[in-house]
């Protein structure tokens, strides 16, 4: 008959495996989550800029103004209020995206926008015809 429960060796092996997984996963976990959240927020603000252009019937532009800040301006270069808060702990490549009033189409497909936090990075791509924002690790 087999004894009920686990042997001491089995418990030690499980604890050893769990500690190895935690040592590998813990340093990346908070950074990856925060970077992903910040990238999604920028993607939503790009979509919001596109929606403003279609809704109000004028050109709207979103552009980087600092290492972790960006602004949305209308056709008269007036900022949209409230201004987006700065990204937390993330460096963003320079970018300028303008959307036309007709269909919310980007005026020009810009280069990919890279967000970096530590050694992690995420890339945002805006498609040329539709203005769809894609997040790529």
Image: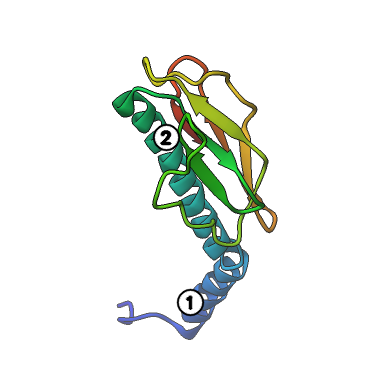
Q: Is residue 51 left or right of residue 135?
A: left
The outermost residue toward the bottom is 8
Res. 49 mark: 2
Q: Quadrant of the C terminus?
A: top right
Q: How is the image coloured?
A: rainbow
Task: Find residue 91 and report its horizontal and vertical position in percent.
Answer: 65, 52
The outermost residue toward the right is 119
Q: Quadrant of the N terminus?
A: bottom left
Inspect this view and state whether residue 59 appears: yes
The outermost residue toward the front is 76
The residue positioned 45% from the left and 25% from the top of the image is: 59
Task: Calculate the distance from the C-alpha at mark 1 to the C-alpha at mark 2.
Answer: 57 Å
The residue positioned 66% from the left and 52% from the top of the image is: 67
The residue positioned 53% from the left and 57% from the top of the image is: 86
Residue tagged 1: 10
Task: Find residue 48 and report its horizontal and vertical position in percent.
Answer: 38, 37
Task: Find residue 8 and report its horizontal and vertical position in percent.
Answer: 48, 85
Secondary structure, mark 1, is helix
Q: Quadrant of residue 47?
A: top left
């Amino acid at each position: 008959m087999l004894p009920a429960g686990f042997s001491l060796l089995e418990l030690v092996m499980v604890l050893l495996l769990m500690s190895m997984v935690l040592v590998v996963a813990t340093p990346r976990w908070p950074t990856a989550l925060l970077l992903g959240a910040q990238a999604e927020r920028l993607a939503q603000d790009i979509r919001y800029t596109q929606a403003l252009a279609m809704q109000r019937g004028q050109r709207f532009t979103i552009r980087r103004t600092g290492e972790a800040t960006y602004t949305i301006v209308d056709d008269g270069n007036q900022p949209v209020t409230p201004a987006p808060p700065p990204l937390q702990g993330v460096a963003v490549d320079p970018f300028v995206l303008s959307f036309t009033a007709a269909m919310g189409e980007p005026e020009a497909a810009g280069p990919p926008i890279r967000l970096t936090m530590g050694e992690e990075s995420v890339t945002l791509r805006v498609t040329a015809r539709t203005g769809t924002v894609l997040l790529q690790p």
